Amino acid sequence: MSVSFARTLSGGSVPRVGTERPRRPNWRKVKGFLFDLDGTVAETDSLHEVAIREMFRRAGASADVVVDHRFIRENISGVDNADIVEKFLPHLSPEDAEKWIVDKERVFREVAKTQIEPVQGLRELMRWIKRRGIAAAAVTNAPRPNALMILEGIGLAADFAPVVIGPECSNAKPHPEPYLAAMRKLGLQPEDCVAVEDSVTGATAAVAAGVHTIGILTSQTAEAMGKIGVSHTIRDYRDLLREIETSG
């Protein structure tokens, strides 16, 4: 598989999807973790399902669109809002589309603020990261208010810096630019880092940025993640901690 993204971190070339990389990182050499947010640090797909169903109803989306877990997994997870509108609400004017996006995110925050929980094992992994002085960044296509709400909601806002927002970059995921931006801010190279992603869109970006990418199976299948070059998959962070602990 090849990827047309060829942006660079500091003048060099970015490894493409399909470049041979070790199946497991050397955990003693990892200097930075790059985390997606929705579905990766917090289980949010069911919350997005509620928000999308309501906002599609308000906007008059096609009756053929059935918003369920599969729809969220295949069409919403990791996807930029502008692309969602273009695909499913093409009848909206630019002004109405912009308002729909703002309202959709407001509805999501209202649903999520009292129900959001971290993915199992995340708190323990973050303690391991802190003890070793490893950097932890958030790299997401979510709007900044949502990103901060998620991190504050799970009580880990102080543990993630920087918080890179895809639509604030020159290109959002699936382009690698958000990951390249995070590494520039951290002063790290792709070989120094591990990315964790739950969506095909996000994992495509991380792999194209040359980062060892772990797929967390909160919304996708191992087969779907493997097809785009994800190094290996975990069910949750308890799996990852066991791997780290047994690596010696």
Image (spheres, rainbow, N blue to C red):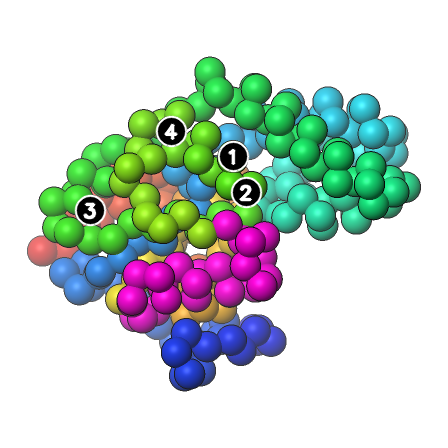
Can residue 170 be seen? yes
Q: CA distance from mark 2 to mark 1?
A: 6 Å
Q: Between marks 4 and 2, how big is the CA–CA gap?
A: 14 Å
Q: Sequence-wise, which precedes: disc 4 or disc 3? A: 3
Question: Of callouts 4 and 2, which one flags the residue occurring earlier in the amino acid sequence?
Answer: 2
Circle nearer the viewer, 3 or 1: 1
Per the image, the residue denoted by label 4 is 152
Looking at the rendered structure, which numbered label has been put on residue 142? 2
CB atoms at circles 2 and 1 under 8 Å apart? yes
Residue topped by disc 1: 146
The outermost residue toward the right is: 91
- Taking 174 as reference, is 215 left or right? left
Residue receiving disc 3: 129
- The range drawn in magenta is 165-191
**Residue at (82, 37) in percent of width and height:** 96
For numbered disc 4, what is the local secondary structure? Answer: helix
Number of other residues with Cα within 10 Å of mark 3, as a class: few under 14, some 14 to 19, many 20 or more: some
Q: Between marks 1 and 4, how big is the CA–CA gap?
A: 10 Å
Instruction: Report the quarter where the N terminus lies.
Output: bottom right
